Image: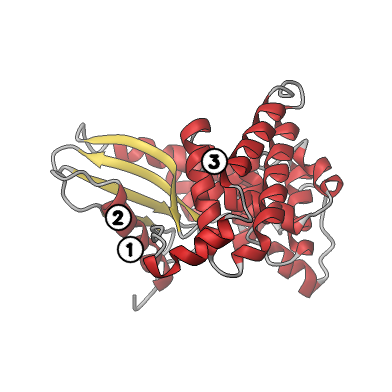
Amino acid sequence: MAERKPISKKNETAVAAVSKLIDENALFERIATIIENRKTCAGAYANLEIIMMYWEIGRHISSITLDSRRTGYGKQIVATLAQQLQEKYGNGFDYTNVSRMMRLAERFPNFTIVAPLAQQLSWSHFTILLPLKSDESFMFYANDAVERKIGKRELRRQISRKAFERCEIADLQLTEKSAVPFNMFKDPYLLDALGLKNNYLEADLEKAILTELEEFILEFGNWFTFVDRQKRMTMDGDDYWLDLLFYHRKQRRLVAVELKIDKFRPDFKGQMEFYLKWLNRYERLPDENEPIGLILCPQASRGQ
């Protein structure tokens, strides 16, 4: 995870000069006022108010630090501000999340565009949508999530399967219930092995498979302990999600499990190696062994 570098002595004079233009205490107090004002409005429209608060914070910070960000000093201001906010209001205001707030405001200067989505999508949905490059793709996946009431996991899957790009290329006529052909998600051999022979919606199918896998692994013995499902890992401002995380008490190590619907590909191994490095660095305790990973695929790839 990227670490914030201190300002060098060489730049102290320049920083002092620029700091006269930006009152850091006043900036923090202004953001704190925004947070306090918006928190009092929470209630029936809590989700809308929270996202509006994030957008307002992002707009204010962006307008104050826009010019100084070009010199690098603005990033230091944002990092300092985020640290202050995090200490007072919790992890929801860490540097990564504050940067997302700024990205949201810069992408949609007019909140009326975002408001209808903010009433029905959580901030977690927005964090998945914000990295998308085009506004068209953002709105495509956002509207699809609203119409089909899909969760974060299914939204990430739709994006990873490039539903928007496929629709543009093939000019698909989408149904109201699905953005991709239904039979693309199912593998009969995998379903039979797990006892899931009935027709499942995509999100329900994946949830059922993960539940079966969780119970299956725990049946290996009492040494396995469940740790987390959809383990969040943040690296350089981007979020990554591991399907299942266990702990083996006898071996004293974390066990990462990743479910793949497609047959094995070499990039699956690279993805798992990334997860293991992250777990080794940020989750492994001093007296534990290095984490190991398990990739579950319905079909092996010949020659791999």
Question: In the rendering, which numbered label is found on residue 136?
Answer: none
Residue 266, position in %: x, y?
39, 72
Crowd rating for badge 2 (residues with CA inside 10 Å; few <14, some 14–19, many 20+): some
Residue 253, position in %: x, y?
20, 45
Structural distance between the alpha carbons of marks 3 and 2:
32 Å
Q: Amino acid at mark 1?
A: Glu
- Foreground: 233 or 6? 6
| Residue under the image location 13 percent in, 43 percent down | 287
- Where is 290 relative to 151, above or below? below
| Pointer 3 residue | 93
- Where is 215 relative to 291, above or below? above
Residue 25, position in %: x, y?
57, 41
Q: Is residue 252 left or right of residue 240?
A: left
Q: Secondary structure at mark 2?
A: strand
| Pointer 1 residue | 273
| Pointer 2 residue | 293
